[in-house]
Amino acid sequence: MDEPVILRQFLGMPRYMVNLIELAHVVDLLDRYASRGVVDRALNAAEIDRAMLGQAQCFVPYSAEAMVVETVARAIGDRHLGARLGRDFDYLAYGSYADFVLGAPDLATALDRGRRALMCTHPGSDIGLRQTGRHIVVGRNSSGLSAIGHRHLDEGAIFVIANVARHFLGADWRPDWVELPGTVKEPNAELGRMMRAPVRMGSAMPGVAIRLSELGTFNPRPPAPDRTLSLDALAKLMGVAPSQSMPDAVLHSLRINLVTGIASEAVVARQLALGPRTLQRALEKEGTSFRELRARFIRDEACRLLAEGDMRIDDIGKRLGYTEPRSFRRAFKTWTGLSPRQYRTTARDA
């Protein structure tokens, strides 16, 4: 599958999303810096429940991750919490994406793979490359995003990018300089000490300067031939659906939130980084509405739970928002022509 086809899969998605694989690892790291109560309050502020974090093949808005980190940073008084998270971040937590990037034959190919496959971890963002003299500056570009806490993610990004370079160049490698966006022009001494490199402020995106002569460095730990991945295989392993329209994104959000109940239209809109009216207009263009999608999701989820699990029928109704068992049974018979018990028996006998 070539790059344009992969990228077209996300044209209907809200911009700047992040895979829950990353957010789950970030929350694990936050638990080391702050109490569980502080982290839980930060998650609640972003309308995320810990129970959602086990769903690796899902996306949430990039702004939600930024808000979580910012809220914890303010609570513990750590101005550079994002940098510390990036420093401690285990790149292998990305799973198949890390295998794809770090399995490249050389550093230049690894950077190109990271650029082409970023839609598996950060739809809407891209890897920016800028050549300057004898260096190439590699950065993660989320231009136009102004979210609370975005600065923390920018600082973390330079450490994550540097970790990729160190896989090829050795644990002691350090960049000749790093760059961060913002209006402040003076270098940041604390970040410089953490990064072990000069910090240049006021750039267009967070970036790491790598010498051009280092790009051809071969992989010191190449994977076995049978462990190599194609971009197509990676997308499937990461749970990237073959198409992502706005209705798909809404159903996706409803599925993520199911652990805490059926989400309202306002909650889904916020999680997709949209206003309610913008979401309504987008769905109207697709010939549907939030109400129709919500009803379809509840119906399909009811059928799935009855066919695949042993949950009590009344508990299934409660999970799907029905406080009265008879209301759920009546609605289900309207959908399928069968009672929930009859449907379960028929599905298991099939």
Image: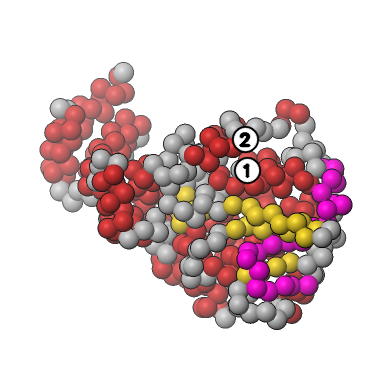
Mark 1, mark 2: which one is toward the viewer? 1
Cα distance between the residues tagged 1 and 2: 8 Å
Taking 218 as reference, is 207 above or below it? below
At a point 76% along the width and 29% down the height, the residue shown is 225
Q: Which mark is residue 231?
A: 2
10 left or right, relative to 105? left
In the rendered view, would you say 319 is above or below 3? below
Residue kind at label 1, given as amino acid type: Arg
Say which quadrant the N terminus sits in: top right
Q: Position of residue 113 (x, y in %)?
A: 68, 42
Question: In terms of sequence position, does the residue under pointer 1 or pointer 2 come before the other?
Answer: 1
Q: Is residue 338 left or right of residue 140?
A: left
How crowded is the residue under tag 1: few (<14 C-alpha within 10 Å), some, or many (20+)? some
Q: For the point 52% across and 49% down, which residue is it?
A: 123
Quarter holding residue 208 = bottom right
Residue 191 seen from this side: yes
Depth order, front residue of 29/198: 198
The location of residue 259, given as percent across then percent down, is 37, 51
**Residue at coordinates 18% horizontally, 51% vertically from top-left?**
323
Q: Residues within 10 Å of mark 2 (few under 14, many from 20)?
A: some
Residue 216 % position (x, y): 84, 45
The segment highlighted magenta reads 198-220
Badge 1 vs badge 2, beta-carbon distance below 8 Å: yes
The answer to whether one can see residue 171 in this image is no
Q: Quadrant of the C terminus?
A: top left
Q: Secondary structure at mark 1?
A: helix
Answer whether residue 212 is magenta in the image. yes
What's the amino acid at mark 2?
Answer: Leu
Label at residue 193: none
Please give the residue where the numbered disc 1 appears in the rendered image: 116
